[in-house]
Amino acid sequence: MQWHSLSGKDRLKAVGVGIGVSILTAVFMALGSRAGVSPFPKPPGLAFAETVLGRALPLPVGLLFHAVWVTAFSVLYVTLFRDALTLTRALWLGFALWILVLVFFFPVVGWGFLGLSVSPKLIVAAAISHFLFALFLWGLCRWAFSDLGFSRA
């Protein structure tokens, strides 16, 4: 793992990948919510935005928070692993972020350690969303950085 200096073109690609990943994950979260299978009391990005700003906010503000942090972590992935944007590394990033959500994010937004103040189902729902994050991140990087000759590992 090393910090890569990205060209302007690669920075734009990484931001584009991040925006794409944020849109795809938001769509899956919205579909889960509409289907009634999501255990989240509200979209996590909205819960975080409301906690940070200390007031009720409209959904687009939550989506913006979601897009910013997903894009930031996508750019971090590309910056750290520019020469080896593998599925394994994307899965490890998704796993690390899932753990961070369970022990830091959920308590901060009032959902308790591991989300247990709401439901143990939040653990699985967060795992699924972070797994999808990793898959979308890897897949969009394969497409955007196709000049790298990807490894499947």
Image: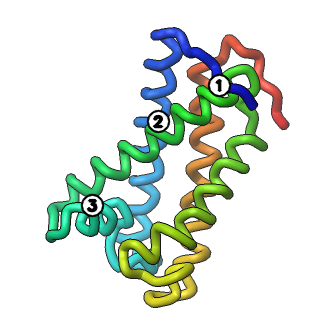
For marks 3 and 2, give the CA distance.
Answer: 19 Å
What residue do we see at 34% from left, 67% from top? 43
The residue beneath circle 3 is: 49
Assess whether mark 2 and mark 1 are in contact (beta carbons under 8 angstroms). Answer: no
Q: What number is the disc on residue 3?
A: 1
Q: Nearer the viewer, residue 20 or 102?
A: 102
Q: Is residue 79 above or below residue 46?
A: above
Q: Earlier in the sequence, mark 1 or mark 3?
A: 1
Which element type, helix, strand or loop, lies under badge 3?
helix
Assess whether mark 2 and mark 3 are in contact (beta carbons under 8 angstroms). Answer: no
In this picture the colour scheme is: rainbow
Label 3: few (<14), some or many (≥20) within 10 Å? Answer: many
Q: Earlier in the sequence, mark 1 or mark 2?
A: 1
The residue beneath circle 2 is: 18
For marks 1 and 3, give the CA distance.
Answer: 29 Å
Q: Is residue 91 above or below residue 37?
A: above
Label 1: few (<14), some or many (≥20) within 10 Å? Answer: few
Camera-side mark, 1 or 3: 1
- Rendered location of residue 99, percent (x, y): 62, 65
| Left or right of residue 53, residue 103 in this image | right
For marks 1 and 2, give the CA distance.
Answer: 18 Å
- Rendered location of residue 86, percent (x, y): 75, 34
Q: Amino acid at mark 2?
A: Gly
| Left or right of residue 72, residue 93 in this image | right
What residue do we see at 56% from left, 72% from top? 103
Camera-side mark, 3 or 2: 3
Q: Amino acid at mark 3?
A: Ala
Q: Amino acid at mark 1?
A: Trp
Where is residue 29, by image quadrant?
Answer: bottom left
